[in-house]
Image (cartoon, rainbow, N blue to C red):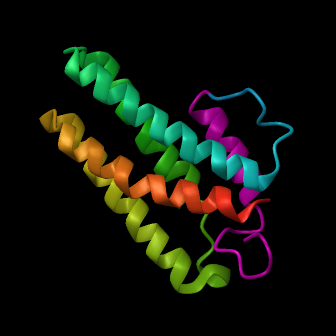
Amino acid sequence: MYASASPFSPRASQGFSNAYRRVGIETGVESASPHRLVAMLFDGAIESIAQARGAMQAGQIEAKGRAIGRAARIVDEGLKSNLNGAAGGALASDLGELYAYVTRRLMHANLHNDAAALDECQRLLEPLRQAWASIGP
């Protein structure tokens, strides 16, 4: 997916690394391949959604907000901002729209304590994570 038809920009590897630093994930980033960095972004977003769900159920409003904010930053700053519309064409455009939708739903979940919105975000991201893992580096 990182060949010339990749939906990610040529500088995406640096962008992925920077996104991870901004959201506080350090371990393994420096030596990870661009493919691994994207996998880490998917894992981080899905893990943050799970943390938000747990915090929501426990009534921990501050922890819920932090976890949702982290998931939204990963999706927006890590996954969406590194798409390359010129090389990725319709795929990059569709992914960009999906990531924008997921970010909006995460904000909705935070504002309205909507666990169903968190579940929806996870259901949307999980197949992408699995597909990304299946293509290998």
Q: Quadrant of residue 79?
A: bottom right
Residue at x 19% of width, y 15% of height = 59
Is residue 65 toward the left or the right of residue 16 in the image? left
In the rendered view, would you say 51 is above or below 75?
A: above
Residue at x 33% of width, y 50% of height = 121
Residue at x 68% of width, y 82% of height = 87
In the rendered view, would you say 106 is above or below 22?
A: below
Residue at x 44% of width, y 39% of height = 71
In the rendered view, would you say 80 is above or below 37?
A: below
In the rendered view, would you say 12 is above or below 95?
A: above
Which region of the structure is painted magenta? 1-24
Looking at the rendering, in which quadrant would you find the C terminus?
A: bottom right
Front-most of 45 and 69?
A: 45
> How many numbered circles are shown?
0
Q: Position of residue 119 (x, y in %)?
A: 28, 44
Q: Position of residue 98 (x, y in %)?
A: 39, 66
Is residue 50 toward the left or the right of residue 90 in the image? left
Q: Position of residue 35 (x, y in %)?
A: 74, 55
Q: Position of residue 129 (x, y in %)?
A: 55, 54
Q: Is residue 130 magenta?
A: no
Is residue 9 toward the left or the right of residue 51 in the image? right
Q: Residue furthest right?
A: 31
Q: Residue furthest left?
A: 112
Is residue 1 toward the left or the right of residue 109 in the image? right
Looking at the rendering, in which quadrant would you find the N terminus?
A: bottom right
Q: Quadrant of residue 48?
A: top left
Q: Quadrant of residue 49?
A: top left
